[in-house]
Image (spheres, grey):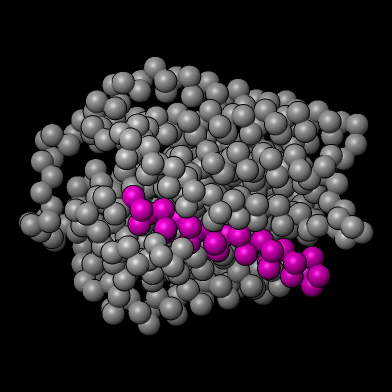
Amino acid sequence: MLNLFKQGHPKGLFLLFCVEMWERFSYYGMRALIVLYMVQELLYSAQKAGNIYGLYTGLVYLTPLIGGYLADRYFGQRKCISVGALFMIIGLFLLAFGPKTLFLLALFFMIVANGFFKSNISSVLGLLYENDTDKKDSGYTIFYMGINLGAFFSPLICGTLAVKYGYEYGFAAAGIGMLVGFILYKCLENKLLGDYGTFPAINKTSDSSQTVDESNNNQQLFALVVLMLFTIPFWVCFEQAGSSLTFFAEYQTNRNFFGLEIPTGYFQSLNPLFIITLAPLVSAFWGILRSKQKEPTSVEKFTISLFLISISFVILAFAGFLAGTGKVSPLWLVAGYFIMTIAELCLSPIGLSLVSKLAPRKFLSLLMGCWFLTNFAGNLIAGIWGGSYETISTTKLFGGLAVLSFSACLLLLCFISKLNNALKR
């Protein structure tokens, strides 16, 4: 991965990579614990916990729309990133050290925090590359590896602390991770980021680097919005990791390994582990196809993603069927997460890069927030869907997700030609 940093990428990529790594460490560390915390400590039902989880993770991806607007219009991305990091630290430490009665307040702080943070750090990365679109895809892939590096370690560290010492220690570790990221950001932002993201984009509309013909870009933006809608079924499936798949790992998976019990949170490290190992391979694979002029378009990659995630839930539905007669091998979850990860690599970093390429600079953070708006819808539905874990069989729960994503795949196939023509790659 160090070689990737040497391939002409801006130095600011390293800083944003590290800050996003620590932010995702805090988010996924908390996410690995939150549903079980609600059920085991707050004594919520699985349905109530799933609904709160879905609402929380949904709002986490709704508020970046507001944060993006505020950054573009008033504050600039850099100030918003700082405010978001501070709110996140407060929320996590409140979760760790505050009374249980303040649980929802802690979640509120983290929802607001993500609104300021999420879309703006992704936007600053795009600004660093300006019009260098060839390196931008690679830059976002590296950035995405940072996300998953933090997401890999956090369930292991936070999950272990929660099991051995109590949930508050796991939440505290997540808060410390965000604190480290914030300190790193404040120490190096001026040195490595220059003026990028310092001022509101609305004040820089005459910037010579912004040469996009907006009248010709309208068709592309419309196609992008249509493509975004097709990501919602993907996120409904993918975000089961924090709800129904966590319950499945806890109650229906044999977690004994040579006499030791694997903490449930560890399974949430599978996806980021696979991302870290597979991202360079997938990127190289696209490069080989590109050299042969056979690389799939962004729309085609999204279609592949929906197909693959439907296959992952076919596998998990079969595991749910087997679990009806006893706990199943953890290899079923490993297989499901593996295919789910390849699906993610065909969609998420591709989408981030596409938004950065097509969005007019004065609306960059706002449109990045629109991209995360699909996560809001997906997470909200995912929480409701995952909350039905106690009321329907896991075979039906996972099978329904397979049908949903495969249906979306077939529908997107019908629009590939029109969307390809509009986006013009």
**Residue at x 35%, y 79% (from the top left corner):** 188
Q: Tell me if 19 is positioned left or right of 195 in this view.
A: right
Q: Nearer the viewer, residue 316 or 363?
A: 316
**Residue at x 77%, y 33% (from the top left corner):** 319
Q: Tell me if 387 is positioned left or right of 25 in this view.
A: right
Q: Nearer the viewer, residue 339 or 418?
A: 339
Measuring from the top left, give residue 105's x and y in whole percent: 58, 62
Looking at the image, can residue 280 be seen?
yes
Q: Is residue 338 magenta?
A: no
Magenta-tinted stretch: 137-166
Q: Nearer the viewer, residue 386 or 91?
A: 386
Q: Vertically, is 4 above or below 47?
A: below
Measuring from the top left, give residue 393's x and y in whole percent: 78, 29
Measuring from the top left, give residue 424's x and y in whole percent: 23, 32
Q: Vertically, is 190 above or below 369?
A: below
Which of the 4 image quarters holds residue 303? top left
**Residue at x 36%, y 20% (from the top left corner):** 415
**Which residue is farthest bottom?**
187
Which of the 4 image quarters holds residue 173? bottom right
Which quadrant of the rendered structure holds the C terminus? top left
